[in-house]
Amino acid sequence: MAAALTRPTAREAFVRSALRECARLRADPWDLALVTWIPLLLLALFAWMFSAGVPRELPVAVVDLAQLTGPITVQFATGSERFTNLDADEADRPIPGEVIFVDEAGLVCARRWCWRQSDETGARDTTTGILITVEGHHDSADQDIAGALADLQTLLIAHQPGVALQAGQLSPEQPAFLVEA
């Protein structure tokens, strides 16, 4: 007499497999923790870490001060200023009326608030002095910019010992910032 072997259905195979895995998890508390409460704890930890929020969508420009002639002014473009996009070969002209950051020689450092930065004034490996601009035009911009500024200062001090920092936040009440040489 021969015994017939029957193949289990997909449902039976799934149930057997699930019961076998549950038995293994019950046998070892660490395995159970790794698939249940530890991921939940990590999720809660990350949620707490980011609960204060991270400043986003703040336009940033990093300008090599050695490439400038005189101070930078934020103004509306006339269309006669020169601008070369990062990694571009040909110069371009800003659209008249567009907001630009420009030096006394008409070299545009950044366009469209700081969403487009120029190749001429971009920081390089040889750069020794920079101006970092961070902008915001939304309701909580003052707080977001202050937070970004504090984060930048902390990072620069931690990763560039001996760096000389000067910081300022512009507003209608304080429309200028003088960089001391």
Image (cartoon, rainbow, N blue to C red):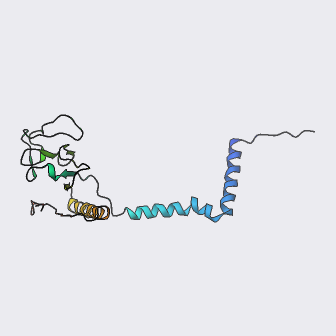
Instruction: Please state, as top left, top right, bottom left or bottom right, where the N terminus lies in the image.
Output: top right
Left or right: 1, with 71 as reference point:
right
Question: Can I make out residue 107 in this image?
Answer: yes
- Is 43 on the left-hand or right-hand side of 88? right
**In the depicted view, which residue is nearer to us: 110 or 16?**
110
Q: In the rendered image of this protein, does residue 112 appear above or below residue 92?
A: below
Tally of marks = 0
Q: Is residue 28 left or right of residue 39?
A: right
Q: Quadrant of residue 45?
A: bottom left
Looking at the image, which residue is at 6% across and 45% down? 105
Residue with the most extreme front position: 126
- For image coordinates 16% across by 53% down, the residue present is 65
**Residue at left offset 14%, top offset 48%:** 67
Quarter in which the C terminus is drawn: bottom left
Horizontal and vertical percent position of residue 68: 12, 49
Query: Percent from the top left, x then y, of residue 58?
Result: 24, 53
Residue 113, given in percent of the width and then of the height, sits at: 17, 48
Residue 134 visible in the snapshot: no
Say if 145 sits above or below 12 in the image: below
Query: Does residue 39 lie above or below 86 as drawn?
Result: below
In the picture as drawn, the residue positioned furthest to the top comes out as 90
